[in-house]
């Protein structure tokens, strides 16, 4: 199917080139202005050439990296983002040519307006530049499990202006790319092993001994014992106040597996939930 589309694009380019050379003969009897036809043919020709170039670049890159036809990574995203920017510029040029305006005269005449637009669109342009830099960087890639500021999750998309994260609750979080450089970033996927920490709180009224909580967790994690590096894990006390104690259960997997990490987290929290005794509210006696 991809080969067929590429063939149709090449055929379309050849047809448009022929039409561009003979537009006066083909469209001469129509009442459509010649410059409009020329602009439209030129834009469509540029669009198909850009499409074909993008397809060729993606094909050779995937072939060199031995990737599937539908696989994607930062470079593929970068190629797509560059294609989008070039096509946007071509569309603007087409509109100016359609209105019989020279780009130099147009932008010179809009100096004050351009300055105002630059101030208004400063954040948007900053997002685009940051997105382009990040797309061709190897620091953050699609599929990495990262913590950006207070958000933690798997990177599922890198667009020109946003990074999309899927957190542990399967919620999609969108983070502007220009904020990435002002946030603390922890990339868990670059570690040799998969270190994980599950945090939970236990009310002091539950009166659960430390060893009992740890035993419940170890028992619940027996199905995953072969996936752990070394011992099952370690239960630590993070903090305590008058009402609750915050625990952290730290474990390490032999290899990075986001789905398994999510299952283990849910297993730990379910184990704590099921062993927590029910606190009965004191009975209130109404006066007779």
Image (tube, grey):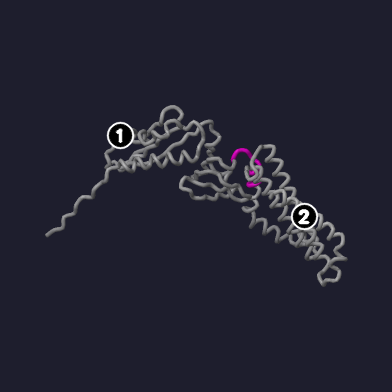
Residue sitting at x 65%, y 46%: 77
* 39 shown above or below 257: below
The residue lying toward the viewer, choosing from 224 and 159, is 224
Q: Position of residue 273 (x, y in %)?
A: 33, 43
Residue matched to label 1: 212
Q: Position of residue 267 (x, y in %)?
A: 39, 40
* 211 shown above or below 279: above
Secondary structure category for the residue under label 1:
helix
Magenta segment includes 75? no
- How many C-alpha atoms fall within 10 Å of the one at disc 2: few (<14), some, or many (≥20)? some
Q: CA distance from mark 1 to mark 2?
A: 69 Å
The residue lying toward the viewer, choosing from 184 and 158, is 158
Taking the image as shown, residue 277 lies to the left or right of residue 139, namely: left
Taking the image as shown, residue 174 lies to the left or right of residue 12, namely: left
Q: How many marks?
A: 2
Q: Position of residue 127 (x, y in %)?
A: 62, 50
- Quadrant of image for the C terminus: bottom left
The span shown in magenta is: 130-140
Residue matched to label 2: 46
Secondary structure category for the residue under label 2:
helix
Residue sitting at x 55%, y 40%: 144
Q: Which mark is residue 143?
A: none
Magenta segment includes 131? yes
Taking the image as shown, residue 271 lies to the left or right of residue 154, namely: left
Taking the image as shown, residue 147 lies to the left or right of residue 8, namely: left
Residue furthest to the bottom in view is 31
């Amino acid at each position: 199917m991809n080969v067929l589309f590429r063939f149709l694009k090449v055929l379309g380019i050849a047809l448009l080139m022929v039409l561009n050379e003979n537009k006066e003969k083909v469209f001469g009897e129509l009442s459509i202005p010649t410059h409009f036809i020329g602009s439209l043919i030129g834009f469509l020709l540029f669009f198909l050439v850009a499409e074909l170039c993008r397809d060729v670049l993606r094909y050779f890159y995937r072939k060199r990296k031995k990737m599937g036809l539908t696989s994607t990574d930062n470079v593929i995203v970068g190629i797509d983002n560059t294609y989008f920017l070039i096509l946007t510029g071509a569309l603007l040029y087409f509109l100016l040519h359609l209105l019989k305006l020279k780009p130099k005269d147009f932008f010179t005449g809009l100096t004050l307006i351009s300055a105002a637009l630059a101030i208004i669109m400063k954040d948007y342009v900053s997002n685009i530049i940051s997105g382009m830099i990040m797309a061709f960087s190897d620091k953050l890639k699609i599929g990495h499990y990262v913590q950006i500021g207070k958000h933690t999750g798997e990177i599922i998309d890198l667009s020109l202006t946003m990074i999309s994260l899927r957190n542990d609750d399967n919620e999609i979080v969108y983070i502007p790319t220009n904020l990435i450089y002002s946030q603390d970033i922890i990339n868990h996927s670059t570690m040799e092993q998969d270190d994980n920490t599950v945090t939970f709180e236990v009310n002091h009224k539950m009166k659960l001994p430390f060893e009992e909580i740890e035993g419940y967790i170890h028992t619940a994690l027996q199905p995953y014992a072969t996936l752990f590096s070394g011992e099952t894990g370690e239960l630590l006390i993070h903090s305590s106040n008058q009402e609750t104690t915050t625990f952290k259960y730290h474990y390490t997997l032999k290899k990075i597996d986001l789905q398994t990490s999510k299952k283990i987290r849910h297993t730990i929290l379910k184990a704590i939930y099921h062993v927590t005794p029910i606190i009965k509210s004191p009975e209130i006696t109404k006066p007779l």
